[in-house]
Image (cartoon, rainbow, N blue to C red):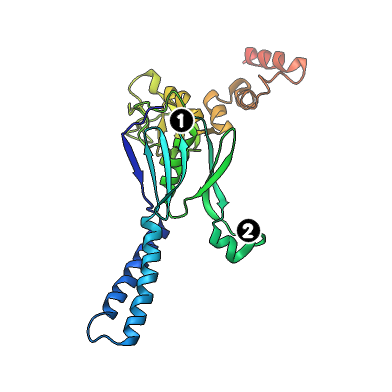
Amino acid sequence: MKSKANKKVYRPLGFESVLFLAFGLMMLSFSLIMFLPPIKINSIAYGTLSGIFASVFTFNVLGQKIVIHENKMYVYLWGINRWAFDLTYPHRAKMGFFYQDKIDYFLHGKKNNRKHFSIQVRTEKEKTCFPVDLYSTKQMRTIVFILNNSTSSKFNDRRLQGQEKYLINASLEMTIYSKEKRKHAHCEFCRKNFGNDAEFKSGYVTKDHHHWICKKCFEDFKDMFNFKVSKASYAAMEGPAAGGLRNAVEQWSGLGPAEPRNGGDAEACSVGLAKK
C-alpha cells in the first residue's frame, strides 16, 4: 500500500465535537469575564472552575486526531498517541459500541457495560478498538474503508475519490438508463456519462436514483464497498417473458435456472403460441 498523500490528518467534526467546543469556549469566555476588575474572591473561584471545565471540553476535542503517514495510522486521544496500525498488513474493521475507558470503568464498573461508539480492528494476532464518537459519520466510514482496504491492489486507483463516504455498504438496483427519467447521469467512479454508448445503456443505481455506477466500476469495486444488489432488479432486467422473472431470481439465489414443473408445460406453451 502506498499513501495517496504524504500525510493526512482527520480531526473530529461530528455534532458532539462541535457541541463540546461551543460549550468549552462559552465556559472560557465566562472564566475570563470573572477575572475582569473589580475582582472578588467569588469571581476568582467561579472563573477558575469555569476555566477547568473549558479546558476539559476543548482539549477533549482538540486532543483527538487520526494521522495517516508513511503506511501507518496513528490514533491520538487526549493528545497522546494511543494506537498505531501498520497499513501494509490486512485488517478487519467495523463500527459499533466497543470501547470503555478507565474513567467509565471506575465510575460505572464492568457490570454496567457503558461503552463509547468506536471502531474495532481485528488482525491475525489481536483485537483492539478506539473511540470515534466525536467524529462525523463520513469520517468514520473513511477510516474503516482505509483499514479494510489498505492492502488491496485497487486502493490507489485514481477512480477512488472519497466515494466511501456515501456508497459503502450501499443497496443498489440494476436498471436501464433512460433520459426521459433522468437527463444526465454519470458513473460515480469513472465519471463517464450514461446513454452515450452501448456499454453505458444500463448499470447500477442507488435506491434514490441519485448515484449511478457503470458495470465495469461495479465489478472492480464491489468487494471493497460491499455493494448489495436487489434480486428483483436482476429479474426486471431479464423481463417476465418465458419465465424470465423466475429464472433471474433463482439464478441470483444460487439455485440455477428454473426447470418446467412438469413435462407438458413447455410443450403446451409452444403449441399455444403456434396456434395464435
Task: Say which residue label 2 marks.
Answer: 113
Inspect this view and state whether residue 209 appears: no
Q: Nearer the viewer, residue 252 or 125?
A: 125
Badges 1 and 2: C-beta atoms under 8 Å apart? no
Residue 175 x/y as whole percent: 47, 29
Q: Nearer the viewer, residue 174 or 133?
A: 133
Give the number of the mark in front: 1 or 2.
2
Q: Earlier in the sequence, mark 1 or mark 2?
A: 2
Query: For numbered disc 1, what is the local secondary structure?
Result: strand
User: In the drawing, does residue 268 fall left or right of residue 192?
Assistant: right
Amino acid type, residue under disc 2 in the picture: Asn
Query: For numbered disc 2, what is the local secondary structure?
Result: loop
Residue 143 drawn above or below residue 111: above
Q: Nearer the viewer, residue 159 or 178?
A: 159
Residue 218 x/y as whole percent: 46, 26
Task: Say which residue label 1 marks.
Answer: 204
Amino acid type, residue under disc 1 in the picture: Tyr
Inspect this view and state whether residue 144 appears: yes
Q: Residues within 10 Å of mark 1 (few under 14, many from 20)?
A: many
Q: Measure the alpha-carbon separation of dots 1 and 2.
A: 42 Å
**Residue at x-position 65% and y-position 24%:** 254
| Residue found at the far left of this picture | 37
Disc ID at residue 222: none
Q: Residues within 10 Å of mark 2 (few under 14, many from 20)?
A: some
**Residue at x-position 68% and y-position 13%:** 271
User: In the drawing, does residue 254 fall left or right of residue 81?
Assistant: right
Which quadrant of the structure image shows residue 167?
top left
Residue 220 x/y as whole percent: 45, 24
Which quadrant of the structure image shows residue 180?
top left
**Residue at x-position 51% and y-position 28%:** 223
Which quadrant of the structure image shows residue 238?
top right
Residue 272 drawn above or below residue 93: above
